[in-house]
Amino acid sequence: MNRANLWPVAMMLALAACAPKAPPPSPPIVRPAVARAVLQLQVPADLDPHGDVVIPRDAIVHKGSLPGVFVLSKHKHARFRLVKIGATTAHAAQILSGLSGTETLVLPPFRGVHDGTPIHPQPTTTRGPHGSR
């Protein structure tokens, strides 16, 4: 190779060395835990006559057009769970699939809650045959 052919390569290498370098990756965002009220579902008290779970209607969250609920994991994080909704009333919703009835639901307000948000449960409200409806 002659020097005339090396000149463009040398210029590209010099320009590449002067280019700004990408910043180092930032540490992951640590989001503060959110205090939310939770509701403990009980079996069979919150089952309808067909064996489906009945939950408060305001516990349902829509992600796009998909209905779901936030369930409290054993590690105290909110996990979004898809559900299939049946009949609804002004205050309750029948869940045809997606919940077994033994989960702990995260209740509204949902501002700042997403899948994986740490939750510090407040005292739970239990629902059952002698509980409030």
Image (cartoon, rainbow, N blue to C red):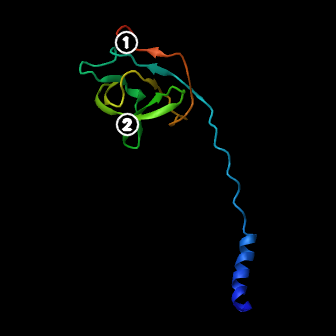
Could you tell me residue 27's position as x and y percent? 67, 45
Q: Earlier in the sequence, mark 2 or mark 1?
A: 2
Could you tell me residue 79's position as x and y percent? 48, 33
Q: Is residue 31 above or below residue 17?
A: above
Task: Assign a secondary structure to mark 2.
Answer: strand
Q: Is residue 15 visible?
A: yes
Residue closest to the eye, 4 or 84: 4
Q: Which residue lies at the image location 42% right of the left edge and 28% below the top edge?
A: 59
Looking at the image, residue 52 sits to the left or right of residue 125; the answer is left
Q: Is residue 83 above or below residue 125?
A: below
Q: Which residue is mark 1?
A: 128
Looking at the image, residue 8 sits to the left or right of residue 42; the answer is right
Residue closest to the eye, 43 or 7: 7
Could you tell me residue 76's position as x and y percent? 54, 26
Label 2 to label 1: alpha-carbon separation: 24 Å
Task: Assign a secondary structure to mark 1.
Answer: loop
Q: Which residue is mark 2?
A: 67
Location of the C terminus (image quadrant): top left
* Amino acid residing under circle 2: Pro
Could you tell me residue 77's position as x and y percent? 53, 30
- Specify the farthest residue to the front: 1
Location of the N terminus (image quadrant): bottom right
